[in-house]
Image (cartoon, rainbow, N blue to C red):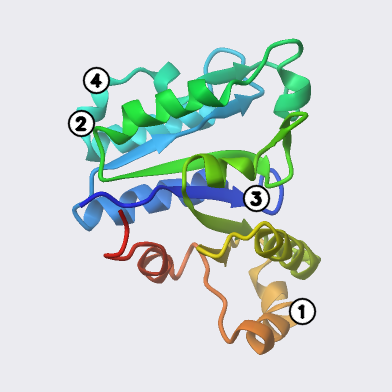
């Protein structure tokens, strides 16, 4: 059965999108799904796109048919400058049609495709194209990954408000614990529990995150 793709984004850069996507590959593959990966744009690329390459190599271990593809299929746009695509691309243009064709090539081999964004939702690509536009472009469900440091309440709520204002209603969010878990439990967890009733984490709740994002209603 084909499932809608999942767009993985985060409250900022270096929060844990790639780590989270790797966990999703593992859990979804263990459920018997053929999982594909797609990193439409990666910046800071010197020799090869490190995040996209890691996703691709990991996905191929579970789904060998992906060997038919090349890394350029997985990461169509690669820019050297570690900046937003709008800046990193210089005078080049990011063409959504190129991305759509690349996605279709991956999707044909898979039951579900994990699409990892670059930076956060409001990262600019072109004057009229932002990272959040990938949700609509690929008709994707969305997973927002938040950090565990002080200030994550503001960061998570701002992103959730943005998703709501954009009319995105098919999303889930979670926290990626890196090094502030004990402090998070004291300073942040009480508020989130009061507002949402529960907080999912990449480390403890990937099964529940997947269950929330994957339903039999997917087309």
Q: Classify 206 as above or below 134.
A: below
Horizontal and vertical percent position of residue 66: 26, 28
- The residue located at (23%, 44%) in the rendering is 34
Q: Secondary structure at mark 4?
A: helix
Mark 2 packing: few (<14 Cα in 10 Å), some, or many (20+)? few
Q: Which residue is mark 3?
A: 15
Residues at marks 4 and 3, CA–CA distance in whole angstroms: 31 Å
Image quarter for residue 153?
Answer: bottom right
Q: Classify 27 as above or below 200.
A: above
Are discs 1 and 3 less than 8 Å apart at CB?
Answer: no
Residues at marks 2 and 4, CA–CA distance in whole angstroms: 8 Å
Horizontal and vertical percent position of residue 121: 68, 47
Mark 4 packing: few (<14 Cα in 10 Å), some, or many (20+)? few
Residues at marks 1 and 2, CA–CA distance in whole angstroms: 44 Å
Q: Which residue is mark 4?
A: 68
Q: Along the line of sight, which residue is nearer the eye, 140 or 40?
A: 140
């Amino acid at each position: 059965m084909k499932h809608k793709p999942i767009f993985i984004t985060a409250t900022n850069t270096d929060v844990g999108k790639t780590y989270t996507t790797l966990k999703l590959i593992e859990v979804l593959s263990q459920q018997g799904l053929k999982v594909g990966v797609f990193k439409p744009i990666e910046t800071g690329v010197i020799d090869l796109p490190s995040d996209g390459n890691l996703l691709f190599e990991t996905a191929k271990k579970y789904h060998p048919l992906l060997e038919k593809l090349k890394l350029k299929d997985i990461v169509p746009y690669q820019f050297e400058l570690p900046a937003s695509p709008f800046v990193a691309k210089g005078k080049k243009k990011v063409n959504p049609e190129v991305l759509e064709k690349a996605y279709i090539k991956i999707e044909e081999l898979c039951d579900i495709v994990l699409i990892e964004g670059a930076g956060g939702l409001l990262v600019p690509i072109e004057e009229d194209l932002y990272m959040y536009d990938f949700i609509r472009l690929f008709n994707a469900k969305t997973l927002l990954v938040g950090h565990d440091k002080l200030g994550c309440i503001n960061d998570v709520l701002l992103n959730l408000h943005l998703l709501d204002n954009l009319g995105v209603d098919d999303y889930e969010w979670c926290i990626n614990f890196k090094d502030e878990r004990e402090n998070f439990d004291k300073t942040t967890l009480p508020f989130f529990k009061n507002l949402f009733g529960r907080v999912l984490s990449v480390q403890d709740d990937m099964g529940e995150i997947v269950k929330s994002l994957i339903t039999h209603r997917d087309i």
